[in-house]
Image (cartoon, rainbow, N blue to C red):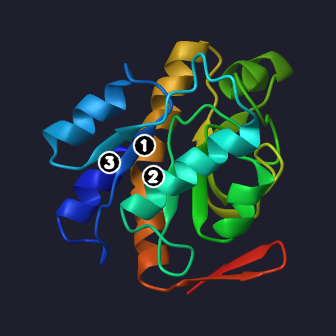
Amino acid sequence: MEAIIKHVQKRRVPANLAVVISSRSDARGLRIAERLGVDTEVVESRGFSGTRKEYDRKVMAALRRHGVTRRDGLVCLAGFMRIIGPECVKRYKHRMLNIHPALLPSFRGIDAQKQALEYGAKVSGCTVHLVDEGTDTGPVVAQSVVQIREDDTEESLSKRILAREHKIYPYTVELFARGKIQVKGRRVCVG
């Protein structure tokens, strides 16, 4: 999130930052966004007794309040550890990106780096993908490869992947904002 904000603020991306929304009031990202002058809003998930649909409607209402629309907005998920429901996915179809610390479709879900190490994979990396109704199953927009070293730990691999995430995610947002991403079924064409 911080890398995207800084990329936009340096005018590398023809877009305006609307809001950072968090499901937790203690999220570090909120403090970073506030320090960088970006509006923030919390849609608390802890203790929320409603349905996923009701929660998603609260998130969508927050997005609307900040001018993020299905026609000209882009929702970037970064550390938002909730499954987005179908109503929200439909509203922002092909306008919602997520980053995942693995080369999808391998090692979906949580603990991707641990999964890669336990599997004995020789490479991992990160993937920016469009969000669909599955978990890390949306069309792939961009990927970056990281070699897995013999002495890697979950922590060392995660650190190297995160460094790539900080480059690939802002770059993908820039491509999107410049209208260079087109979706044809599951294929995403860049250019």
CB atoms of marks 1 and 3 within 8 Å:
no
Residue 86 x/y as whole percent: 79, 55
Q: Which residue is mark 3?
A: 3
Q: Position of residue 76 (x, y in %)?
A: 50, 55
Residue type at mark 2 is Ala
Residue type for callout 1: Ile
Q: Are marks 2 and 3 in contact (CB under 8 Å)?
A: no
Badge 3 density bin: few <14, some 14–19, many ≥20, Cα 10 Å: some
Q: Is residue 30 left or right of residue 122?
A: left
Q: Secondary structure at mark 3?
A: helix
Which quadrant: the N terminus? Answer: top left
Crowding at dot 1, Cα within 10 Å, few <14 / some 14-19 / many 20+, comes out as many
Q: Residue at x 37, y 46 (%)?
A: 20
Q: On the rendered image, what quadrant is the C terminus found in?
A: bottom right
| Label pair 2/1, CB-CB below 8 angstroms | yes
- Name above or below for residue 91 compared with residue 54: below
Give the spatial CA distance, label 2 vs label 3: 22 Å
Q: Quadrant of residue 151?
A: top right
For label 2, the residue is 62
CA separation, marks 1 and 3? 16 Å
Which is more toward the observer, 92 or 146? 92
Q: Is residue 144 visible?
A: no
